[in-house]
Amino acid sequence: MKPRHKRFAIIGGGLAALGIAAALVLNAFQSNLVFFFTPTQVAAGEAPQGKTFRIGGLVKEGSMKRQSDGLTVRFIVTDTAKEMSVAYTGILPDLFREGKGVVAQGKLGPDGLFAASEVLAKHDENYMPPEAQHAVEQAHKTAKSVKQ
Amino acid sequence: MIPELGHFALILALFMVLVQGTLPLIGAARGSLPWIALARPAARAQFLLVATAFGCLTWAFVANDFSVVYVAQHSNSRLPLIYRIAGVWGGHEGSLLLWMLMLSGWTLAVSALSRHLPDTMAARVLGVLGLVAVGFLLFILFTSNPFERLLPAAEDGRDLNPLLQDPGLVFHPPMLYMGYVGFSVAFAFAIAALLSGQLDAAWARWSRPWTTAAWIFLTLGIALGSWWAYYELGWGGWWFWDPVENASFLPWLVGTALVHSLAVTEKRGSFKNWTVLLAIAAFSLSLLGTFLVRSGVLSSVHAFATDPRRGIFILILLAIVIGGSLLLFALRAPKVGLGGSFALISRESLLLMNNVLLVVAAGSVLLGTLYPLFIDALGLGKLSVGPPYFNSVFAPLMVPALFLMALGPFARWKHASLADMAKRLRSAFVAALVVAIAVPLAFGQWTPLIALGLLLATWIIAGSVVNVIERVRATGGGLLAQPRSWYGMHLAHLGIAVFVIGVTMVKGYESEKDVRMEPDDTVSVGGYTFRFVGVREAMGPNYRAMVGELELSKDGKVLRTMNPEKRQYLSSAMPMTEAAIDTGLLRDVYVSLGEPIDERAWSVRVYHKPFVDWIWGGCLLMALGGLVAMSDRRYRLKKAASARVVTQGAAA
């Protein structure tokens, strides 16, 4: 094999590897990007039905209710403007509390109940999940612009 | 007074590294011997000053000096001594100081162990390390001073985050930082070689043990972090593709590519430009990782807003390091020769494929990690990239890499024959096939993915065994007469195989249950039965705990009692789950307490995790392989040889 051919083979191999990787990445990206919506956006119908997404906000005080099976918990997430009900089966993270910020991932049911598959744990009690913070700030901004 | 002393020592250290980062480099360029000779004493003084500063901060923690802001934020008078010491790196400012201490330590090691290098080369390497230190000290002094005072002093500290009150904090960050910072030495060697134009096999041989050392620490650091997350977070997971984890994994991937590429540069003189680029990339990713994690940018781009100076400083420093070294590379690279040529099938080409796969994998992980940041920064909405993305991109890229791994040691340099390799590896392939078919059946469930994982792992192990037998037979020198670097390679490859077995078995056969349990309730998982006895209260040094009692049994035979805890830390009122784990060679059984449901019942989570410890065992083997390879005779022999050349040169 001539050096020129060899170089072509090596460059070709490299490009093929990159191409395969690009295909994998694009394919995986399409199905695995998880978008974030605030309760206000969900109330406005912006969130997709039957597709996984994240919500965030504050756990409403006094809203947490344990269901009869002992493991399913229902609570309300609010961004201070709109509220939505969330159900989660399993053990909640240590820092899950009423009145604190929370981020949950799951699907929205036709009845408007958000079935969470994951409630994200944070590592510090004083830390507000940025998404939850964002949701509350968005709600405040909207409230202000409505008043003006 | 002592915190001020530490602050002062840091300022002096800045002046010292300014000297170390400029004069020796200028001296090396101009051939001025007195300036070149400044490098080593400056490196020693730098270490002494930074160590003093670090000692002062440690003292402030040990003595509970809550007039220092950083101590007041991260410690508490009731905190046990060991965590007051480890608490030094429990927050942002102290972490950076630890980083700086590590950098000074590596610099000191280079200055002490580089006697065999030409003086100009050593001066350049130390000079570049000095420049890196300038950036870091400026960052610490201007944006993250750990010695800042709080007036009036706090009565007591806010306490260390309970998650961090664990032996993991004592070992994990220092190991990880040793690895991160260790790549600065490989980087400094690469830049020094570019500056001098001496990019050759000798440079690769000098640089190799340092790179391997950094890689060992990084491997151990990541493994420790993964293990810590596994037993501490109470979710039973060992890797979450969390951005913070990715930040440490990226330099590992590129570092692994670098270790292999250096082998080609040393043995064959090829891949020189590529090796330099990898060294630059590995260090840049280490910097990126440290800063992403420490600045909080990763959770949100808005972390920039809380302290804009920090964020901007980070970006400027990254731009200078990456931009500067790439500019230098662009200026110097065309002058670098190509080195030995090689055929399409050869050890070089196999290592090239290894490099391409590792770098592409690193690229895809980087993309998944940074993409949400870009989208957020551009105001296009908020999103996250979940573990499925990483799994579905990373695993397919690693399959060919693992397959080629067994092939590599059989390929000859320059030109290898596929037919010959296939013949020698036939028995290994048969063994792998048998295991892949039989073992999953023995475990009661056969899926293509489990079979593939076991096939690749056995293929690597059997390949290594065949290679060892062949070599020992051919050389006739016995098992112990072989070079250590060659053993190191096989050990590290074996580590990968053990790791792959662990991952495959856990993913394939793990089971988990969340249940509500009252006293005397039982739950079974993976053939093990837990009987819930009850929960009692206990006091720790700085927490109150609810201690669960569960009886673990198998086939009606009681094995032991397990005591998972739910702790409530007194100073922060923060709850913490402490899982109870029964560790075994072939499986872990894992139980953690959820929360009380009523007076009698608790929610409890139980796991059965087959082969999970093989994951970390594999990492240990990899690190051990690196250690053995580093101790190879030739790195020591060449030292003597090149020392001779230098003295002869001086005599002439």
Image: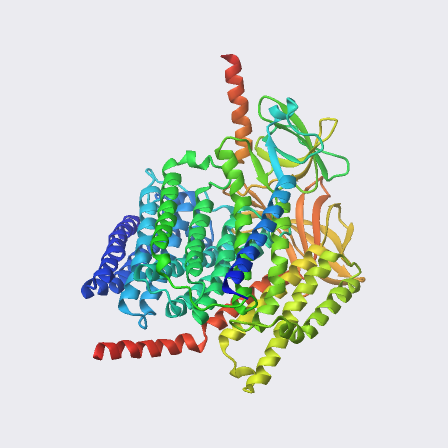
Q: Is residue A26 in view from this perspective?
A: yes
Between B555 and B198, the one lying in front of the other is B198
x then y, percent, for residue A63: 66, 28
Q: Is residue B163 left or right of residue B322?
A: right
x then y, percent, for residue B1: 27, 49
Residue B565 in the image: above or below residue B383 = below
Between B552 and A39, the one lying in front of the other is A39
Residue found at the far bottom of this picture: B476
x then y, percent, for residue B182: 41, 60
Quadrant where the N terminus of chain A sits is bottom right
Residue B350 in the image: above or below residue B605 = below
Q: Is residue A112 left or right of residue B56?
A: right
Q: Residue at x 48, y 63 (%)?
A: B261
Give the image's coloring scheme: rainbow
Q: Is residue B366 left or right of residue B128?
A: right
Q: Is residue B526 left or right of residue B585?
A: right
